[in-house]
């Protein structure tokens, strides 16, 4: 009566690497949030406005660099500054949700990255209208938009493969 008992172990699925998640949560979102807040404060401040106006009148402006960052329209600069500050705060909020693996974190993250990408193009278009400069449709808009779509799709693909982790 020698019975052999076979123990069948279920094969555990391989854990997916989390290096990109760690990079996004531990560095990228922190640096991005700080950068948005700093850029927003600079854009909204009167100090930046008067400094850029002075620089625009100097030889530094020969290559047109000053016009790229300075529209001369104080209301536009302040509005962009406030939007960047809000985006910085939102980045920190979404980061905290992702760090805790909350169920709503991925939805908020997807909204954040789509809004970030959209703001770049909205800014370029409004900037071109305000400063009456020519907008490079092919180089800036089409190529940039295609790149942004690819980046957003890759982020969504990466995190959708790990969505079962976000359940808290």
Image (tube, rainbow, N blue to C red):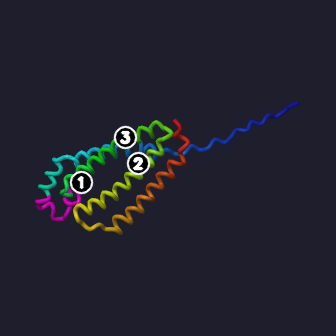
Please name the residue that numbered disc 2 is placed on.
Answer: 112
Please name the residue that numbered disc 3 is placed on.
Answer: 92
Mark 3 and mark 2: Cα distance apart in space:
11 Å
Q: Which mark is residue 151?
A: none
Q: Tag 3, which secondary structure? A: helix
Do the residues under discs 3 and 2 have CB atoms within 8 angstroms?
no
Q: Tag 2, which secondary structure? A: helix
Q: Which residue corresponds to the image point at 48% horizontal and 54% vertical from the top-left?
A: 154
Magenta: main secondary structure: helix
Mark 3 and mark 1: Cα distance apart in space:
25 Å
The answer to which of marks 3 and 2 sits earlier in the sequence is: 3
Q: Which one is closest to the eye, mark 3 or mark 1?
A: 1
**Which span of residues is magenta-colored?**
56-70
Q: Which residue corresponds to the image point at 79% horizontal and 34% vertical from the top-left?
A: 5
Q: Tag 1, which secondary structure? A: helix
Please name the residue that numbered disc 1 is placed on.
Answer: 76
Image vertical order of residue 135 relative to residue 70, above or below: below
Q: Give the image location of residue 92, x and y in percent.
A: 37, 40
The answer to which of marks 1 and 2 sits earlier in the sequence is: 1
Whether residue 129 sits left or right of residue 94 in the image: it is left
Q: Which one is closest to the eye, mark 1 or mark 2?
A: 1
Q: Residue furthest right?
A: 1
Q: Give the image location of residue 165, x and y in percent.
A: 53, 40
Give the class, few, some or many, for how many residues have Cα within 10 Å of label 3's Cα (few <14, many ≥20): some
Do the residues under discs 3 and 1 have CB atoms within 8 angstroms?
no
């Amino acid at each position: 009566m020698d019975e052999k008992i076979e123990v069948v172990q279920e094969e555990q699925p391989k854990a997916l690497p989390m290096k990109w998640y760690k990079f996004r949560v531990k560095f990228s979102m922190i640096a991005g949030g700080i950068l948005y807040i700093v850029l927003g404060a600079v854009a909204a401040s009167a100090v930046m406005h008067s400094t850029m106006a002075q620089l625009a009148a100097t030889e530094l402006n020969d290559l047109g660099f000053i016009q790229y960052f300075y529209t001369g329209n104080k209301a536009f600069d302040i509005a962009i500054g406030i939007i960047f500050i809000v985006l910085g705060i939102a980045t920190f909020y979404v980061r905290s949700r992702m760090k805790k693996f909350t169920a709503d974190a991925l939805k908020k993250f997807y909204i954040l990255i789509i809004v970030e990408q959209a703001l770049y193009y909205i800014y370029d278009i409004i900037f071109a209208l305000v400063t009456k400069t020519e907008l490079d449709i092919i180089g800036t808009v089409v190529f940039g938009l295609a790149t942004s779509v690819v980046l957003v799709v890759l982020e969504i693909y990466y995190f959708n493969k790990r969505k079962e982790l976000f359940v808290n």
